[in-house]
C-alpha cells in the first residue's frame, strides 16, 4: 500500500505541526515569518509550506534531535501488526520509520500542505496521513499500540487534556513517547544581561507552553500512565548561528514589540557577530523526552 493522505474531519485551531515556534521577522526570508507562532494551529490555513518544511528539515538534522528521535523509537519498539501513530507528523519521516518495523504507520497532521509533502516524500512506503487534532484524535478508545508526539505540546496552551486524549486511544500495554523543548533552558552569550532578560521574558510570555520539556513526565503521570524512561539532549548552535536563525532574529522581534530600544537591538546583534568572529558565540537549548506505558 502506497502512502495516502485522508481527511479525518474539519480543520480547526488545535494542533501545531511538529517544529519550533518561529518568531517575527521584518522580511519574508526563509526561517522566520511575520505571524507570531506560525506553527500554531490557528495559522494552519496560512502556512507557507516550503518554509515550514525547510524549518522542520533544519531541526530534524540537528544531532540533539536525532538523538532524541532514536531514543524514542527504541523506547516505543513498534512491532509488525501493531498500530503506530505520530501526532503532529509534519513532513512524515517518523511515520516512515514506524512503517519500517512492519507496523501500521499513521501520521496525524492538521496542515493539508504538510500532509501532501509527507506523501510525496514517503515514495511508496506503506504509511497513512490523516487530518486530525491532538485534543480529538481520530481513533477509537484503546485502538493504538504506539504513539509519539514531538515538539508539538509547546504550541498548545493547555497540554493536560491533550495528553489525556493520547492516553485514551492507547491500548493497555500501549507505549507513548513525548519529546519537547524547554525554552527557559536557552543560553545566549555574550549579551547584556538586562537586555537579554527582557527579550527572554517576552519570548516566554509569547509562547503557548514554553516550559513544555520539564512538564512531560507530570503530564504522562497525571494521565494515568506509568513512566518507563526519560532523557534529555542539548542543542548547541554553530558560530554562524549568531547571524542567522532564531538568535539572529531575536533583536528584530523584541524591537518590533517595543521590548528593547533600537540602540539595544543594534548592540545585541553586533556583540553576537563580533563574538562569532573570534569563535566565542554560544547558544544552547535543552530538549527532553519521556516514555510511558498504559497499565
Image (cartoon, rainbow, N blue to C red):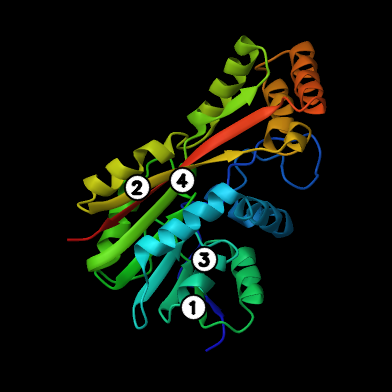
Whole-number angstrom distance, CA of label 1 to CA of label 2:
24 Å
270 vs 11, nearest the viewer: 270
197 vs 101, nearest the viewer: 101
Query: Which image quarter: residue 121?
Result: bottom right
Q: Earlier in the sequence, mark 3 or mark 2?
A: 3
User: Is the residue under label 4 in contact with that under label 3 (CB below 8 Å)?
Assistant: no
102 vs 107, nearest the viewer: 102
Q: Earlier in the sequence, mark 1 or mark 3?
A: 3
- Identify the residue under disc 2: 230
Q: Identify the residue shown where x is 32% and y is 52%.
A: 163
User: Is the residue under label 2 in contact with that under label 3 (CB below 8 Å)?
Assistant: no
Q: Earlier in the sequence, mark 1 or mark 4?
A: 1
Whole-number angstrom distance, CA of label 4 to CA of label 2:
12 Å
Q: Earlier in the sequence, mark 3 or mark 4?
A: 3
> Circle 2 sits in a helix, a strand or a loop, which is it?
strand
**Residue 150 appears anywhere in the view:** yes
> Measured from the top left, where is residue 293 in percent x and y?
25, 59
- Identify the residue under disc 1: 100
- Identify the residue under disc 3: 94
Q: Earlier in the sequence, mark 1 or mark 2?
A: 1
- Identify the residue under disc 4: 180
Counting other residues with Cα less than 10 Å from the Cα at mark 3, is it few (<14), some (14-19), or many (20 or more)? many
Whole-number angstrom distance, CA of label 3 to CA of label 4:
15 Å
Query: Which image quarter: residue 147?
Result: bottom left
> Measured from the top left, where is residue 122 in percent x and y?
61, 76
> Circle 1 sits in a helix, a strand or a loop, which is it?
loop
Amino acid at each position: 500500500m502506497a502512502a495516502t493522505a485522508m481527511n479525518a474531519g474539519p480543520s480547526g485551531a488545535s494542533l501545531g505541526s511538529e517544529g519550533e515556534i518561529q518568531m517575527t521577522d521584518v522580511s519574508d526570508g526563509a526561517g522566520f515569518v511575520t505571524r507570531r507562532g506560525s506553527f500554531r494551529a490557528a495559522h494552519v490555513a496560512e502556512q507557507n509550506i516550503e518554509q515550514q518544511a525547510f524549518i522542520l528539515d533544519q531541526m530534524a538534522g540537528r544531532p540533539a534531535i536525532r538523538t532524541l528521535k532514536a531514543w524514542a523509537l527504541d523506547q516505543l519498539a513498534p512491532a509488525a501488526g501493531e498500530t503506530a501513530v505520530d501526532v503532529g507528523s509534519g513532513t512524515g519521516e517518523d511515520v516512515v520509520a514506524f512503517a519500517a518495523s512492519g507496523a501500521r504507520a499513521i501520521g496525524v497532521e492538521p496542515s493539508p500542505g504538510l500532509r501532501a509533502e509527507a506523501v510525496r516524500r514517503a515514495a511508496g512506503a506503506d504509511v497513512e496521513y490523516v487530518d486530525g487534532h491532538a485534543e480529538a484524535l481520530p481513533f477509537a478508545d484503546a485502538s493504538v499500540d504506539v504513539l509519539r508526539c514531538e515538539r508539538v505540546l509547546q504550541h498548545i496552551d493547555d497540554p493536560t487534556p491533550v495528553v489525556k486524549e493520547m492516553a485514551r486511544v492507547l491500548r493497555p500495554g500501549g507505549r507513548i513517547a513525548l519529546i519537547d523543548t524547554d525554552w527557559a533552558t536557552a543560553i545566549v552569550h555574550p549579551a547584556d544581561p538586562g537586555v537579554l532578560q527582557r527579550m527572554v521574558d517576552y519570548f516566554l510570555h509569547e509562547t503557548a507552553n514554553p516550559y513544555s520539556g520539564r512538564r512531560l513526565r507530570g503530564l504522562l503521570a497525571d494521565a494515568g500512565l506509568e513512566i518507563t524512561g526519560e532523557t534529555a539532549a542539548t542543542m548547541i548552535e554553530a558560530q554562524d548561528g549568531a547571524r542567522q536563525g532564531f538568535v539572529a532574529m531575536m533583536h528584530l522581534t523584541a524591537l518590533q514589540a517595543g521590548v528593547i530600544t533600537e540602540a539595544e537591538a543594534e548592540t545585541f546583534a553586533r556583540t553576537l557577530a563580533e563574538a562569532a568572529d573570534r569563535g566565542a558565540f554560544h547558544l544552547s537549548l535543552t530538549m527532553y523526552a519521556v516514555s510511558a506505558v498504559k497499565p
